[in-house]
Amino acid sequence: MFSSDGSIGVVFNGEIFNHIELRHQLAALGYQFKTSHSDTEVLVYLYQHYGDEFLHHINGFFGMALWDRPKQKLLLARDRAGIKPLFYTQNNQQVIFGSEIKAIFKHPAVSKTPNFKALHHYFSFKNVPAPMTAFEGIEQLRPGEMAVFESGDLKTKRWWQLDFNENPDITETEASSHIRDLLEDSVRLRMRSDVPVGAYLSGGVDSSAVVALMSQQGEGNVKTFSLVYDENFANKNADRKFARQMAEIFETEHFEYTLGHQEVLDSIDAVTDAFDEPFSGVTSTYFLTRLIAKEVKVALSGDGADELFASYLPHRLAQPMHHYAEVRPRRDSLTPQELELLTPFDKDLSKLEELTQLGGEAEWRMALYLQDDESKALMYSAKMRDHVGSTSTQSLIKDVLKRTKTKDPLNRILQLDFETMLADQVLPFVDRLSMAHSVEVRPPFLDYRLMEFSATLPGWMKIKNGRVKSILKDALQGLLPDEILARPKEGFVLPINDWLILNYKDYVLDLLSPSRLKKHDLFDSQVIQQFIDSHYDRSKNYGPRLWNLMMFQLWWEKHFD
């Protein structure tokens, strides 16, 4: 869409949730709109008025391209959290960009070449980290990043970044109250839509909170959706029970999608195609949005709460690891008060000791990823080791932590995960796999106001005496039942380990067979066979590692064989 004088044009993928308020502000400044409700037109005049600073006024998510005709300037921008992607490549005096890598490959000037250094990180993270992609010459904007192409020169810069800077004066009461207010308003904005809006509902704290607030604010029953399994997995039964309980309490119109192992295999090519890159993270979204698409085209989710308010194992370890380093010399004679600081690892210090022996925070955090640099090197062929060279995933982690200004041990790990895991793994699976069924997912926890406020809270408010997401749960008191607030996190993940053992062995043996691996000669096939043998004789759980290799192999064969 272009401005009325044709000077400014915008194309974008996403949603501007505060476009109504922005339209009123711009109209008061004298801008005349051709449409009655287009958020794209709002962007045009917002840029005309504020220039590059216009991005700071937006509450929403987007991958955006703006053309300033008088200045002959192209501006590309990605939203603060990175909910929507934007890929680009520069070819001579051209910039080619798109929301999908496959779109860029439609251009005749772009060729496919694997980026082996980026792929090295995949075998640790389960994804390729921005700004890299799996293809040489193609990059992606990082969250909160913009690129300006002017006079043949392309420059990138961060227009927004989440910096953790704790407010020592805020009380828990003030913090929990403000979190509740911000989340309520975020849900209100994200329920704005020309079409019906539904919600994911796992029965966990995050999705239940979103559904509860939707039920309070909306008219009529909210449609909610859960994923269940046709096999009886002990660790997956709780989600069904609690999701049904929440649906009953908040009187939602509840739908369940029953998934079995064969459907996952039957859909694996479509899942691979949705990413354009190797990806072995969570793929549950693909199957649930298949159901959602039959009922609604927009769904709210609880994504982002874990990364902002702390839930994962590295988050639970951060504070105990910090305190353990201080008391380690006398670990056999710690006082009750000192042991309390090591909760929930105070009963058995072996995990803390094991990780401490590895080195500092980058070293112990690296140990919790799928593979470290040394184990990957043992898995590689000589050819792959040559391609990878001195590339180090641990160095990448260290670089992020060096840029982290806060000294708070938990917030340092949260910033690392916000910039890597959330942006490069969680949000891609949310966006790519839902858009494969033309469903738009909106995560209220990733409203920039809530993100920025969470970054002012000290780590002890987020995990307190071993209670994860403590301040968030305080904010939700009275909204959710105590049983939901107290339940452990299940995780929205497929039971791949079970399926690999029970159902997928023939598929694994075929896909990772020496004859198929030999075609690219990137791995030592004997080492891969050792992974397989150890997994199936159950001496080691190599399930996540095998799934990682399987998804890589499928991607490679699709693009390069």
Image: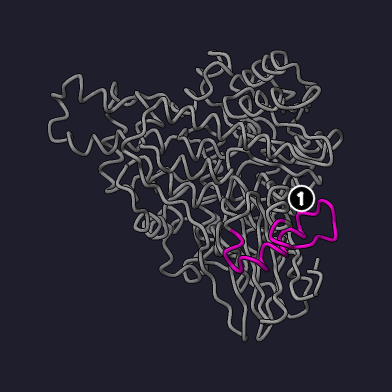
Which part of the image, by quadrant, shows the C terminus? bottom right
Q: Residues within 10 Å of mark 1 (few under 14, many from 20)?
A: some
* Residue at screen point 32% across, 25% down: 343
Residue 130 percent location from the top left of the image: 55, 60
Residue 341 percent location from the top left of the image: 26, 27
* Residue at screen point 80% across, 75% down: 6
**SS type, badge 1:** helix
Which residue has dot 1 on it? 269
Q: Is residue 431 magenta?
A: no
Q: Amino acid at mark 1?
A: Asp
**Span colored in magenta:** 28-55
Which part of the image, by quadrant, shows the N terminus? bottom right
* Quadrant of the image occupied by residue 4: bottom right
* Residue at screen point 58% across, 29% down: 206
In this view, 343 is above or below 31 = above
Magenta stretch, main secondary structure, is helix
Asked whether the viewer can see residue 414, the reply is: yes
Asked whether 533 or 36 is in front, the reply is 36
